[in-house]
Amino acid sequence: MTRVLGLAVMLAAFWLLLSGHYTPLLLAFGASSVLLVTWLAHRMDIVDHEGRPLELSLRAPGYWVWLAGQILLSAVDLGRRIWAPQPRIAPVVRATAVSDMSDVERVTYANSITLTPGTLAMNVEESTIEVHAVDPALIDELDAGAMAAKVRRMGLG
């Protein structure tokens, strides 16, 4: 029941954020739509262990800020690699381990890899993610595990 209430709270907050109008009629419509969607999700039994809006909402902003910084640093690094007089690009495809991750954590990790310039998650398996990178050092950084540890700390699994 906690997950259903968490879903309702997150939907209401999202609706209020996007609406920007707080007249009684629109608030009633918003509350009605939140209640309807929450009831339907509960009735369809799709509010499960992978959908943790409240727990995720507390940890996700910190991860997003960190990821935005990594995206910026990677973009600068990739720009330097490309625009250097002797470009330092040696494309490679290699698998990186993702042991002890839930499905949601694995998908979040793969998406984070793809969002980071210079790397692309190509294939997600149970225990590995196949990654294309412009330089083997970028996959070595993934193998070091900083990004995977940040994803695990979000508590998605």
Image: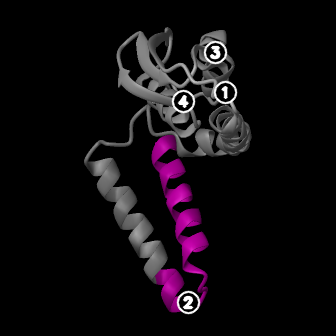
> Residue 90, how many percent across, how many down?
54, 19
Q: Nearer the viewer, mark 3 or mark 1?
A: 1
Q: Which residue is mark 3?
A: 137
Where is mark 2, residue-wise?
Answer: 24
Q: Nearer the viewer, mark 2 or mark 1?
A: 1
What residue is at 55 percent from the left and 79 percent from the top? 19
Question: Mark number for residue 86?
Answer: 1
Nearer the N terminus, badge 3 or badge 1? 1
Q: Residue at x 63, y 30 (%)?
A: 154
Disc 4, SS? loop
In 3D space, how far apart are the residues under numbered discs 2 and 4 (Cα atoms)?
36 Å
Label drawn at residue 156: 4
Q: Quadrant of residue 56?
A: top right
Label 3 crowd (10 A; few <14 / some 14-19 / many >=20): few
- Counting from the top left corner in percent of width and height, residue 81 is at 66, 31
User: Which segment is the magenta one?
Assistant: 1-28
Q: Residue 33, located in which quarter of the rendered image?
A: bottom left
Along the polypeptide, which appears first: circle 2 or circle 4? Answer: 2
**Is label 2 in contact with label 4 (beta carbons under 8 Å)?**
no
Q: Amino acid at mark 4?
A: Leu
| Inter-mark Cα distance, 1 to 4 | 42 Å
Q: Magenta segment: does it hold 23? A: yes
Mark 3 and mark 4 lie on one chain; the one further toward the N terminus is: 3
Q: Amino acid at mark 2?
A: Pro
Main SS class of the magenta portion in the image: helix
